Amino acid sequence: LIAVAVVFCPFYFILDSSDVVQYIPALLALALITTSIGHTLFLRSLSKFSTITASIVSCAQPVYGIIIGMIVLQEFPEPRTYIGGGIIILTVIAESWRMYRYSNKN
């Protein structure tokens, strides 16, 4: 955090930051919802799943972000992004299926 503050400190004096105050509530909400709650849920999932499974499932987060961007912002990605998202989803499904089969054997 200190390194980031030092790197971005010159921009405080260069850029106009008068409009930043109006975005503080949105930034706080974004920090609380996506960062705090997201990391808490991820850490709690480690008690239910293996680290590998939790990490692979968390890789699907960019796909969720793309879907939300499509719905809320009406931004549609390029076709290669759909291919990448499909690969991520297939990996998550394959890992979930593998863990389901493994848990039923034991």
Image (cartoon, rainbow, N blue to C red):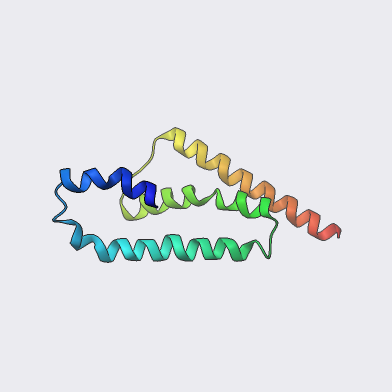
User: What x and y, as percent, mark residue 34?
Assistant: 43, 60
Quadrant the C terminus occupies? bottom right
Please, is residue 104 above or below residue 12 in the view? below
**Residue lying at the far top of the rendered structure:** 80
User: What x and y, as percent, mark residue 102?
Assistant: 80, 54
Quarter of the image where one finds residue 43 = bottom right
Please, is residue 68 above or below residue 37 in the view? above
Q: Is residue 72 left or right of residue 65?
A: left
Q: Which residue is rendered at x = 26% and y = 47% of the image?
A: 9
Quarter of the image where one finds residue 20 = bottom left
Q: Which residue is rendered at x = 64% and y = 49% of the image?
A: 93
User: What x and y, as percent, mark residue 84?
Assistant: 51, 37
Q: Is residue 88 left or right of residue 94?
A: left
Q: Which residue is rendered at x = 38% and y = 40% of the image?
A: 77
Q: Nearer the viewer, residue 7 or 46?
A: 7
Q: Nearer the viewer, residue 2 or 19?
A: 2
